[in-house]
Image (cartoon, helix red, strand yellow):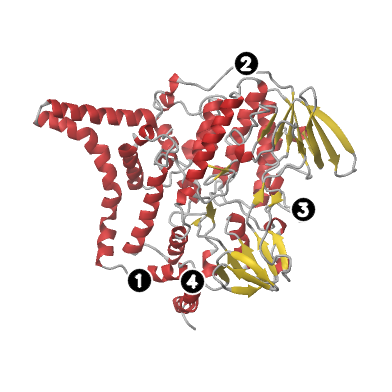
């Protein structure tokens, strides 16, 4: 019997002609031993990686001081002054030491008495909890028989999770800030495990009694007095009823309306066309010829599962930034890699640095076939790793390299039983499963005639219509490019609750429109491959903005009295718990979470990131709103 390496070599030879994305060539290249240059780079890479930061951290403040001692002159004094101002400015900006000069906008606003929440998924539960905590009379409406939204598995309903689905973010990153998970593991939860967590959350905060289950919202319309009339249908009895509220928050999620498909020959295709929303498990697909379209997180997981039981092809338009759910080097969840130090580096520099590290690995031989595949898929994606949404799936690589899953370019047409791909290849298929996303849809929402319907990505903070202010809001419609939706939705919930309770005020309509336009331009520049409008946000930057409005960003002066907590906030995994250390809603539980989670980066890489920041931080002053502006500060 041939070895696995021999079989892989056969596979590489067979597929080379059809290697449209170059992944097999990259894997073959990774198997070549490094040359003299590569071996030299391997020995020197610690110096190469940390040398820039060491020179920045030590030489900038130190050279001027040494020069004064050796050659006292106005020039050396000037150099010292510049270096000290440069370094002090860096420290003040990154630690936000002057932020006490500005606080969250406060004012007197009319408070609401009654609030309706449409949807009882993770974000809907957070809104219910935060509104109840501020004394508001809040009621939730959920069409399913329990909490959880898309995480409540129901084979009868299109949409939501399938039977074997796992979360793409780890338990501690996904969890609400003041309600940690019971598990100590960083392994990603199955959908039923996360559902159990949400049920514990709802019971702990007494939310179940506030939710009307198996109630389908039929219409949400505004009346002449400014209140909202909600018409719901009881799914058990078929009875319809109306209720009235001062405010409405829509938390129904963005995965309700599958994106339309329009391709030549679609109507005459002899196979079936489905959306990934209908996928509930592999049983009905066994033995069929399947084409899965799209390499987002759902598409990658589904294609990987089908590769074991069906003749499966994965069709993608471009490469993708792939990362494993769990880092194979240390066994930690890979989302622990998302920290404030890394994302304080300007976008273009961050993209360059990650690409440089991957190319260096090819030269030094410190790369395996999986990491070579990921590097090549990133290279052919056309944009930097930080300028696209990430797909957290490493399991898809082995089926592709072993021939159980074919990788093809995007579908451009259909002809009889055949699917035609962009590279000219075609193949017969029994079923094409489109995993190309959803379009936000709110068929139940009846807006006033003078208010144009908008995509949530064109709302203030993805939450508010400028024309309606706080009358209606949307929570859960901000998707981090890298990060987790629940902690983002929790901050939205905290802000909405403060607005409803009258302790915070929204900007004027003109200010909101101006902010929407700035955000739109930044989104186009940061995520050039994403269609416009979209729901994608820069995770830490977006949460910092919300936290600033709430008043719950960590207090730098208090953190300086607790150096260990300051260090953990700066270099530890990014979680919602960071925003419950100080300010409204502060929690000892959240502070304990921040202290306990391990950092992912090695010290030499942290030094490099710090050093690049020290050299580059003035760009944020001289190039506002550019790709060279940092996403966030260290705090």
Query: Residue shown at 24%/29% (left/top)?
Result: 82
Residue 225 image position (x, y, % from top left): 79, 22
Asked if residue 581 is positioned above or below residue 315 in the image, the reply reads above
Q: Nearer the viewer, residue 134 or 260?
A: 260
Sequence-wise, the earlier of marks 4 and 3 is 4
Left/right placement of residue 300 relative to residue 358 reads right
Residue 592 image position (x, y, % from top left): 51, 34
Left/right placement of residue 73 relative to residue 580 reads left
The image quarter in which residue 590 lies: top right
Q: Disc 2 marks which residue?
A: 108
How far apart marks 1 and 3 lie (CA) works out to 50 Å
How far apart marks 4 and 1 lie (CA) works out to 19 Å
- Mark 4 secondary-structure assignment: loop
Q: How many discs mark residues in the rendered view? A: 4
Q: Disc 4 marks which residue?
A: 19
Q: Nearer the viewer, residue 424 or 252?
A: 424
Sequence-wise, the earlier of marks 4 and 2 is 4
Residue 578 image position (x, y, % from top left): 50, 34
Numbered badge on residue 157: 3
Query: Residue shown at 26%/51% (left/top)?
Result: 47
The answer to whether residue 31 of the structure is visible from this angle is: yes
Looking at the image, do the residues carrying marks 2 and 3 touch, with CB atoms under 8 Å apart? Answer: no
Q: Nearer the viewer, residue 114 or 467?
A: 467
Sequence-wise, the earlier of marks 2 and 3 is 2
Looking at the image, do the residues carrying marks 4 and 3 touch, with CB atoms under 8 Å apart? Answer: no
How far apart marks 4 and 2 lie (CA) works out to 63 Å
Q: Disc 1 marks which residue?
A: 32
Asked if residue 419 is positioned above or below residue 243 in the image, the reply reads below
The image quarter in which residue 399 lies: bottom right
How far apart marks 2 and 1 lie (CA) works out to 68 Å
Looking at the image, do the residues carrying marks 4 and 1 touch, with CB atoms under 8 Å apart? Answer: no
């Amino acid at each position: 019997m041939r070895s696995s390496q021999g079989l892989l070599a056969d596979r590489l030879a067979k597929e080379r002609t059809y290697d449209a994305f170059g992944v097999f060539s990259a894997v073959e290249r990774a198997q070549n031993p490094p040359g003299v240059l590569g071996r030299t780079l391997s020995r020197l890479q610690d110096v190469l990686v940390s040398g820039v930061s060491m020179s920045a951290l030590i030489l900038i403040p130190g050279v001027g001081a040494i020069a004064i001692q050796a050659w006292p002159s106005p020039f050396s004094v000037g150099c010292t002054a510049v270096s000290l101002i440069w370094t002090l400015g860096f420290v003040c900006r990154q630690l936000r030491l002057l932020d006490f000069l500005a606080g969250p906008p406060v004012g007197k606003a009319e408070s609401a008495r009654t609030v309706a929440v449409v949807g009882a998924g993770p974000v809907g539960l957070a809104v219910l909890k935060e509104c109840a905590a501020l004394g508001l009379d809040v009621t939730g409406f959920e069409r399913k028989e329990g909490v959880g939204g898309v995480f409540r598995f129901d084979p009868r309903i299109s949409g939501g999770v399938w039977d074997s689905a796992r979360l793409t973010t780890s338990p501690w990153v996904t969890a609400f800030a003041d309600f940690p998970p019971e598990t100590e593991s960083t392994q990603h939860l199955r959908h039923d495990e996360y559902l159990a967590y949400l049920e514990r959350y709802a019971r702990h905060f007494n939310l179940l009694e506030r939710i009307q289950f198996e109630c389908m919202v039929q219409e949400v319309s505004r009346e002449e007095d400014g209140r909202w009339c909600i018409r719901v249908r009881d799914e058990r009895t078929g009875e319809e009823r109306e209720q009235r509220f001062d405010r409405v928050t829509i938390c129904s999620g963005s995965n309700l309306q599958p994106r339309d498909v329009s391709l030549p020959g679609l109507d005459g295709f002899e196979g079936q066309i489905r959306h990934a929303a209908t996928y509930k498990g592999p049983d009905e697909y066994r033995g069929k010829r399947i084409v899965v379209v799209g390499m987002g997180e759902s598409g990658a997981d589904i294609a990987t599962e089908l590769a074991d039981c069906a003749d499966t092809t994965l069709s993608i338009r471009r490469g993708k930034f792939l990362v494993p759910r769990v880092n194979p080097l240390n066994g930690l969840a890979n989302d622990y890699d998302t920290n404030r130090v890394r994302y304080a580096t300007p976008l273009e520099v961050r993209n360059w640095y990650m690409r440089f590290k991957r190319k260096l690995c090819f030269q030094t031989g410190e790369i395996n076939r999986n990491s070579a595949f990921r590097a090549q898929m990133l290279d052919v994606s056309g944009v930097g790793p930080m300028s696209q949404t990430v797909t957290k799936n490493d399991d898809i690589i082995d089926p592709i390299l072993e021939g159980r899953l074919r990788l093809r370019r995007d579908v451009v047409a259909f002809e009889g039983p055949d699917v035609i791909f962009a590279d000219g290849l075609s193949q017969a298929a029994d079923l094409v499963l489109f995993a190309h996303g959803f379009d936000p849809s709110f068929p139940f929402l009846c807006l006033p005639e003078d208010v144009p319907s908008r995509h949530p990505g064109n709302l203030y903070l993805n939450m508010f219509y400028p024309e309606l202010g706080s009358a209606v809001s949307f929570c859960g419609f901000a998707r981090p490019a890298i990060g987790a939706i629940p902690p983002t939705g929790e901050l939205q919930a905290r802000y909405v609750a403060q607005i409803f309770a009258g302790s915070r005020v929204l900007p004027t309509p003109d200010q909101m429109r101006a902010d929407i336009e700035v955000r739109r331009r930044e989104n186009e520049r940061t995520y050039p491959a994403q269609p416009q409008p979209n729901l994608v946000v820069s995770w830490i930057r977006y949460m910092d903005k919300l936290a600033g409005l709430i008043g719950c960003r960590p207090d730098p002066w208090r953190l300086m009295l607790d150096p260990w907590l300051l260090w953990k906030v700066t270099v530890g995994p990014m979680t919602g718990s960071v925003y419950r250390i100080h300010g409204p809603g502060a929690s000892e539980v959240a502070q304990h979470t921040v202290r306990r989670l391990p950092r992912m980066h090695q010290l030499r890489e942290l030094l490099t990131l710090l050093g690049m920041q020290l050299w580059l931080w003035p760009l944020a002053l001289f190039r506002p709103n550019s790709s060279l502006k940092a996403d966030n500060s260290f705090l």
